[in-house]
Amino acid sequence: MKLPVLLIALLGHWGEVGHRLIGAAAAAALPAEMPAFFRSAADQLSYLNPEPDRWRSRAERTLDPAEDNAFAPDHYIDLERVPAGALDARDRFAYLDTLRAHGVDAAGAGLLPFRILELSQRLREEFRLWRAATDARTKGWIEARIINDAGILGHYVADGSNPHHTTIHFDGWVGENPNGYTTARGFHARFESIFVQTHFGPGDLHVDENPRVFPSLRPAILAYLRESNALVPRLYDLDKHASFDSTTTDAEDKKFAAERLVAGARMLRDIWWTAWITSGQTVETAESVIAHDVAARGGMDRIHALRTVRQIGLLINGKDTSRLVIENKLPDAMRMEITSAGKTLLRVYDGRTGWQKAPDAKTANLMTPAEQKNISHEADLLSGLVDYAAKGNKVALLGSESVEGRDAYKVQVTLKDSTVFTYFIDHETWLPVKWQGGPWQTMYRAFTEVGGVKFPSRFETTEREATVAAPPVVLVITSMVANPSISDARFAPPADAR
């Protein structure tokens, strides 16, 4: 006997059936290497998947409404409302501050990615505690906690596989509607509750792909939710062609729903697996990643043995190629000569004052405060990572991110003047592969060793969010010399500089 349509509609969020199917399929796809206690809890993990919806009961709401919708934003993220970069916030509170600063209603935008991330991190820490526990009694307590939190995590991961949970069009199209999509309330329930309840049953879902270990949870979670959001038009197109309801027999409707249910199960399985595998790995910190980077470059003794460095190379900007000579006197003096068509631009910083001399100019000009700030950053030959504490810089590890197919640690450096740079350090070589600062991004393509220290020798710089793609500005170092004799007078501003 089928449930009345009204009751099914009230279930919400993939409904009891959809959530349990996702939990069961995720558990069934776990590798044999997952702890036995976890794999044997498949039925419980399936049961727990709808749990957060059960907490929002009418009975409790009549006694006190505090719990009813207080955590509703944890179930969705309206990506169209979220300002660029807001989801990079340190935590949900910093994210909410960013939304408010942009005039965005915090509750309206949603918190789903943070809820998934928070519970994923909690699960990984519980696996660490389980690994460290030495007596069976304590392990049993931790196991109970792990299963409970893994099941609850499953609910929010499952929510994210439904495109309705990632968009402002969560229950009927809103705003401009050139495609004539349905605007009627109730589409959300028709798709994830009524349709799923009447078209799917136990054993219908299978995750065939091999498990993934995400190098960093946040980027993986955001990619998953954005993929779901990208399918919003497809969902509405299908409903326009053949309405999602209890009597629909359209094969494309069922195929789409099955794919989204399986996507949720796969993501859930992979987060569980990632939490387990990475709980046994050494946890790097910003300090340890920087220490590895310094060692990979040659070590602090060799770095500190450098007094001066001279670099000669080419600066390629589109069709224009200039000859480049850079002289550094550590810790923070730099002289740069850029010569094109026989004319030379001079940019210099003596550690205190920045100045420049244009081609054919009779006198040098002192740099503006903004220009001086920029050149002081350029003059730090060894980057903001080396001797960061002595320079007054602060560092933070923001996880890992794939850079052109290779995993890299993402280290944020806040300079003494509050400028923020981000370095991406390769997991294997421990050398930087990418740098980001303001609107700019630089890829490090090659390194050259001089004085026993590795320096980048090919840089490719692009604008990060350019509306029109442009070729990178390329800097190629063709020769480097360690500790040449360079006079301080090479960096001092001329007496007539204005």
Image: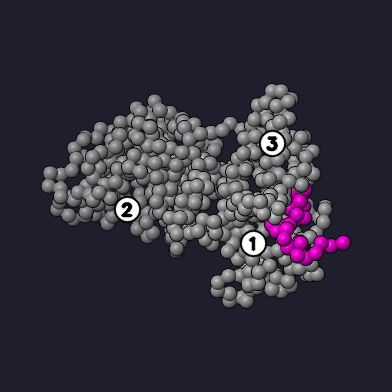
Q: What element carries label 3?
A: helix
Q: Which amino acid does label 1 sit on?
A: His
Where is residue 178, by image quadrant?
bottom right
The mark that comes first in sequence, 1 or 2, is: 1
The mark that comes first in sequence, 1 or 3, is: 3
Q: What residue type is labelled 2?
A: Ser
| In the image: residue 67, left or right of residue 242 | left
Q: Distance between the residues labelled 1 and 2?
A: 53 Å
Of labels 1 and 2, the one closer to you? 1
Look at 35% across and 28% down and name the residue there. 304
Residue 227 vs residue 165, the one in the foreground: 165
Q: Is residue 13 magenta?
A: yes
Is residue 450 in view from this perspective? no
In the rendered image, the residue lying farthest to the front is 63
Q: Please state the horizontal and vertical placement of residue 240, each as a whole percent of the image.
A: 69, 73
Q: Determine whether label 1 and label 2 are within 8 Å by CB.
A: no
- Residue corresponding to mark 2: 322
Residue 164: which numbered mark, if any? 1
How packed mark 1 is, by other alpha carbons closer than 10 Å (few <14, some 14-19, many 20 or more), is many
Q: Which amino acid does label 3 sit on?
A: Arg
Look at 25% across and 32% down and name the residue there. 485
| In the image: residue 180, left or right of residue 389 | right
Look at 43% across and 50% down and name the residue there. 441
Segment colored magenta:
1-24
Q: Please state the horizontal and vertical placement of residue 391, each as a whole percent of the image.
A: 34, 34
Residue 304 against residue 217 in the figure, above or below? above
Where is residue 359, by image quadrant?
bottom left
